Amino acid sequence: MQDGEDLLLYSLLLPPGTAVEAEKIATALQDELGLHRSEALPRALYGGGVLANRESYGKLEKLAATIKPLGATGSIVHSAELENLPRPRRTSGLDFNDGELIAQTPSGKRMPVPRSSLSGIRAIALLPENPAAEEEDTAASPLHSSTLESPRESHQEEECQRRLQVLVERLNDPGLKDLAFQLRLYSTNPLAVLKIDKDEFDYSCLGENKSDNSLENYLRLLEKLLGWMPGSGYLRQVEDFLNDPDPLAILLSGDNEVACSDRSLLWHLENAAAGEPSELMEDPSTEAGS
């Protein structure tokens, strides 16, 4: 009976990048789902694109109608669809080939991802669950002369150092101490999300641009991936972050918000690739009667 019961439970997703005042979304959650304000506001702020999960279709239909005038077009899906999406694949190394990206896991397994299927990238910062034992030296490494052979390369190096300096200065905020940096790469074929932790990645793919500073390498990897990926897809968040490296702009509340964000984006990518509309599904009561 469990499978049948799951088919009667639904989730409401918001498209990636939806920008609506959290207060208004929280009010809608209170009115339509009966949530207390103390639960509704955090969900509106940190839902990661999954506004409601494992609810009845009727409730979510009303919620979707309420938030649509606010500029949030929701998609109602079977909750089981989200739970069956691929889990993040820990990635410790990347090889850039002409037409594909080779992702390597810590155990040494390799997975080819066609370059054309890469459809999204996201930078993530998380507050630590436990303070780090010792602080990393985030000062910029000395410039390599090999990267300064032309005015163009010199400009690129200066820009990279500017980004690093801005980010390091902002990380001096006591409230942002010991942030953990990650990035996600999203693929449609195969449908997958690659999870990269700043301090658990082999940056050999950067070649001569690799430094001894993992924060600098993290920024360089974001830039390399952004320039290597196809021109369409979910790229704006990383573009904005590299232009103005503000950790608050990529800060998420924790693993739960990251997981919800992954599932929402994967679902939208899967349905966009299939050419299906990402809006309200047909009322299941009419499906049952057909």
Image (cartoon, rainbow, N blue to C red):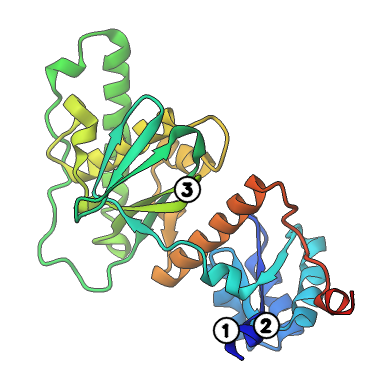
Q: Earlier in the sequence, mark 3 or mark 1?
A: 1
- Contact flag, marks 3 and 1 (Cβ < 8 Å): no
Quick one: 144 or 3, which is closer to the camera?
3
Residue drawn at the location 71% of the way across and 70% of the way down: 24
Q: Is residue 44 visible?
A: no
Q: Position of residue 101 (x, y in %)?
A: 36, 36
Q: Amino acid at mark 2?
A: Glu
Label 3 residue SS:
loop
Q: Amino acid at mark 3?
A: Pro
Quick one: 110 or 244, which is closer to the camera?
110
- Contact flag, marks 2 and 1 (Cβ < 8 Å): no
Q: Which residue is mark 1?
A: 39
Q: CA distance from mark 2 to mark 3?
A: 29 Å
Label 2 residue SS:
strand
Nearest to viewer (mark 3 / mark 1): 3
Residue drawn at the location 82% of the way across and 68% of the way down: 282
Residue drawn at the location 19% of the way across and 70% of the way down: 131
Q: Amino acid at mark 1?
A: Glu
Q: Which residue is mark 3?
A: 190
Label 1 residue SS:
helix
- Quarter of the image for residue 203 reads top left
Q: CA distance from mark 2 to mark 1?
A: 15 Å
Whether 185 is drawn above or below 117: the answer is below
In the rendered image, the quadrant that contains the N terminus is: bottom right
Q: Which residue is mark 2?
A: 55
Q: Earlier in the sequence, mark 2 or mark 3?
A: 2
